[in-house]
Each structure stands twice: as structure tokens, then as C-alpha cells.
Amino acid sequence: MDLIMGMNSGSSFDGIDVILAETEMAEDGFPKAPRFICGGSYEWPKEVADIVQDAFVNKVDMVGLNRLNYLCGAVFAEKAAQFMKENNIDSRNIKVLGLDTQTIYQEQPNHAAIAKMTKEEKDDWVGRWLSGNYPCGTQMGDTSVIANLVDIDTVTHFRPADHTSGGAAAPLMPYLDYILFRDKPGYTMTLNIGGIANLHVANADRRRMFGFDTGPGNIISNYMCKVLFGLEYDKDGAIAVSGKVNDELMDYFMQHPFWDRPVPRSGWSQDYSEEYIKATIQKFSALPKEDLLATACAFTGEAVARSMKENVPEEIIKSTDKLYASGGGVKNPQIMKEIQKRVPGNIKVTTSAEIGIPPEYKEAIKFATIAYSTIHCVPGNIPAAGHASQYAILGKIAVAPRHIKGGPQL
């Protein structure tokens, strides 16, 4: 078995998760389901976090972005090294480290426009992005900086390969779900609740899979907590449970421009930006603060239920008995309650812990698994889910200096 490491800093930007797992290649040419060994979570250094937050809202110039790319690489390397030290892990024993670094900007594909493009138009590679039809994004954290500091072969920046063929590359979770559930008959439904929530349907036939963002996960709840109560998040949903869902605010949330996008939708943190949430709080300032938080949790649940119905065929929904949830949002019982309340009654909402995947670390496990697939030249996208026109080997690889004959020392 090979030891693999994964890291994640998601749209909620609330820390860096690091995991160690093990896997090996199976006879079918794909990795075996990874076995989780240990994990840890770490804070971003404030001086770097402040710059990243500014980058989210386009307040960092080109000179600053250039340096931020290296800074983020150094932060990821530092946290990986700290994790290895705390868990007595020798970097020489790690086959690969996978992480998507930190997304600061992304555009989803215009699926309808791409579908109408002629072969000649698609063959105009430059025109794919001049037209604005094809997706793009920016992640901070240089691959070579990370690999050379931690001395581990490193794979990062998984999304551009899928973007090149018109795929959304968001979410990327369907690939891990395929690895986990490909031997299970029928369909398996999963949900990841980070800053943005995404839902996936796995199947042994990758051509029958689905994956899409559903809207906000815990991003609105977390930011409202910060503004209204001076707290980083609503621990155990204790504040939201004391409030009431407000129908007028719920209607307002359900008019968000996210719903104007064609399915499958992709979202990111700036869909529910600081400005949007502050304006919402101001517009509904007459409501009790607890009601604002309760409605934010209900919005997450309603968005999951609506997106499920709009993306997944009815017969698959009816045949589903469990929805395996992961991500930081599962720690908020009120969010979980609202999802359970609003999805079809035949579906029980549970967590990925039931299948041996700690909910808080599934994203990091995903990136470790994709990286392991990449170094074995196995495609890590699911075109049926992201609507790419072909399979792709995801990521950019930087080789560790330990491979230098004679060593890297002068």
C-alpha cells in the first residue's frame, strides 16, 4: 500500500485540513478506496489570510498576486510539515501530496453556448476563452514551492484540465465518490457542505453520474455569526435553533442570481460575498438576529432540495435511501435538520463517517486520491458530472528534490 497525503482550503476559507491515507492501484486500473489514517486542521497565518481575503474581492494587484502565489505555497508547505512532525511521518515515505491550493477566482462554463458552438469554433483554442464561453479560475499556491519545501512529489491545480474541455471542474468530489462506490450496485448520493454545498450521484458507470453545486453551505451562517454575534460560527447550531425561519427572507434568498444559471450550476464564495450578506442583514434588520441565522440554515436546506430535484432524475431520487453528507457544515445540527426536512422523505441524511470517511476530511482525502490517480495517468474528472467533452488527467506535478541523483545539496 502507498501512503498519500491531501490538503484542502475551501471556499469557506476557515482553515487548512491535512490528511494521511493509504491506497494502491486495483486490478480495474483505478485506485482502491483510500483508508483514512489521521488528519489535522490548521489556521492560516493572519498576515497571509488578510491578503487572500483582499484577493477574493479583486483588491490585490498583479505584483501582489505574484507574491501571494509563493506565499500560499509556503503556507501549505509549512502546515504539511507541521502535520508530519506531529504525527511522526517521514516525507520520504509519502508517495504523493495532493491539494488544489486556494481558489481566489472562478468562472463557470456557459454550457448552453458551448453546446451551440460548431466544431470549427471549438477548434479555435484561443477563441474558447476569448468568447467567454469556457470556464477559468485562479488558485494561489505554487506547486514547485510546496514540493521543494516538503520534499514530496506534489500535484496541484486540478481544475484547468477539465476546464480545457468545457467542464465545470466544480465540484471535483464525484471522482472520489466513484472510487468509493464503484463496486456498489445502483446509485449512491452524497453531499458536501463547505462554504458552498455540492451534491453528487455516483454509479459504477461513470457516464451515469451527476455532480453540481447546490448553493450556500455554511458560508452565510458563518458570516452572519461573525457580524451579528462576533463569533466565527454557530457552534452546534445553538443560535439558529432558537430562531424562526422567516418566509420573506427565504423568498429573498431564493431570488439570488445563482438560480438564473443553467444546470448543472457551479458557485463560489463570492456569490455570497461580504457585501451581499451585509446588504441582506441591513434589508432585514427588523428581524431578530436569531431568525436571520435560522433562515440562513433553512436556505441551505432548501437549496439542496431544489437543486436535487432540478438535476437528478426522479427515479434515481426515489431509489435513494441515504444521503451521505460531509464537510464542516455537518457539524451544524440545524443545517442538517433543515436538509433532512426539505429533501424527499425516503432519503435519510447521514454522514460519510458511516463509510469510514471522516466528514471534516473528505475534501482533503479527495485531493490525495486525485493526485495518486494523476501520477498513475488515470483521469480524475467525471465528464457526465461536469459536462467536459472528454476525460482528463488532472493537475500540475512538481517532482521532489529527493529524486536528484546524489542529492540536492551543493
Image (cartoon, grey):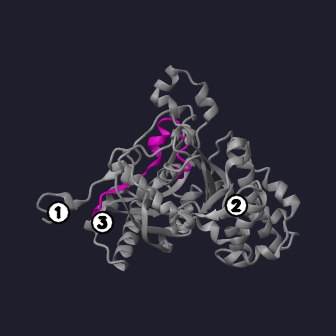
Q: State how far apart marks 3 and 1 are (Cα).
A: 12 Å
Mark 3 residue element: helix
Q: What residue sits 40% from the left and 54% below the top?
A: 32
Q: Is residue 320 left or right of residue 284?
A: left
The residue wearing badge 2 is 348
Dot 1 amino acid type: Pro
Real-space Cα distance between discs 1 and 2? 54 Å
Query: Can residue 347 be found in the magenta stretch?
Result: no
The three-letter code of the residue at mark 2 reads Lys
In the image, what residue occupies the spot 74% across and 53% down? 305
Q: Which residue is mark 3?
A: 149
The reply to whether residue 400 is visible in this rendering is yes
Residue assigned mark 1: 408
Q: Can residue 268 be seen from the camera position used here?
A: no
Place residue 354 in its image quadrant. bottom right
- What is the span of residues highlighted in magenta in the rendered image? 148-173
In the rendering, at what x and y percent does residue 181 appear? 51, 52
